[in-house]
Image (cartoon, grey):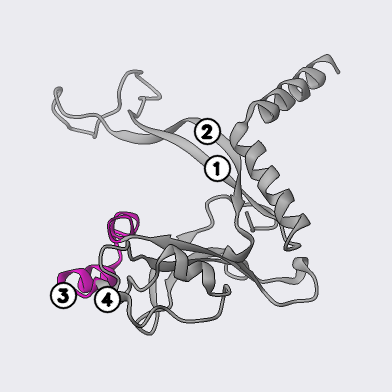
Amino acid sequence: IDTAAAVMEKALEIVLDDDVSHEAIRAAVKDVLLPGRGVCRVRWKPVIETKPVEDPVMGGDLSLPGALPDAEPLTQDVKIWETVNDEYVYWEDVLFDPVRQFADGSWMAFRHLFDKESLIGEFPDSEQLQRMKDANKLDELLKWTEESAAKNTVGSGGALKTADKLGDVIKKAMVWEIWDKTNRRVIWFIRETSGIVLRVDEDTLQLNNFFP
């Protein structure tokens, strides 16, 4: 009993000291009181380091059979730390499957805006994106600004037809992070240019109810 109480006390201390989660909850409460929808998502942030694989028999670093003594050892990615925070989501940056109750939903989606550099940095393995970059056609995706996105109701409206005339205003791509509960995967999708799937992530969190 003492051990369980100590664990609960420590957990409460961490929650109360977590300024990020505290501010996220406060913002979501305001959204509940004003537009009527408050949304927070849980964000898991592991710290991964590459470390040598330990030889389970002889001890020390493990190398490939027959490797020279000065050969590089085998390595593996190891989680050395992790944090879990609540992250505020603006109420118009989320879409839900239109069902009678949330438990029946098969998908939900979060809206993100990426400038050119962050788009390429986040999705370096997207072949379609790289082809558009090589053809100097990335501007076909950068049709939004923070202001134009805020004025368009989530899930409706279109990108600016005059985005190429905005001068020095930072233009961004609108990317949807779609959580597909049926197939337990996360799809990163852009609606512009007839639609581009930037990446499909596997269900690494393995949550019982899938959604974050």
Queried whether the magenta region covers residue 136, the answer comes back as yes
The answer, for residue 200, to whether it is visible in the render is no
Q: Residues within 10 Å of mark 3 (few under 14, many from 20)?
A: few
Which residue shows up at 53% across the image and 74% down it? 152
Which residue shows up at 23% across the image and 34% down it? 65
Queried whether the magenta region covers residue 42, the answer comes back as no
Which residue shows up at 38% across the image and 85% down it? 194
Q: At label 1, which amino acid type do we have? A: Trp
User: Marks 2 and 3: in contact by CB < 8 Å?
Assistant: no
Residue that mark 2 sits on: 82
Q: Which mark is residue 135?
A: 3
Q: Quadrant of the C terminus?
A: bottom right
Q: Earlier in the sequence, mark 4 or mark 1?
A: 1
- In this picture, is 109 found above or below 44? below
What secondary structure do most residues of the magenta stretch adopt? helix
Q: Position of residue 48 (x, y in %)?
A: 41, 35
Most foreground residue, 18 or 99: 18
Residue 103 found in image quarter: bottom right
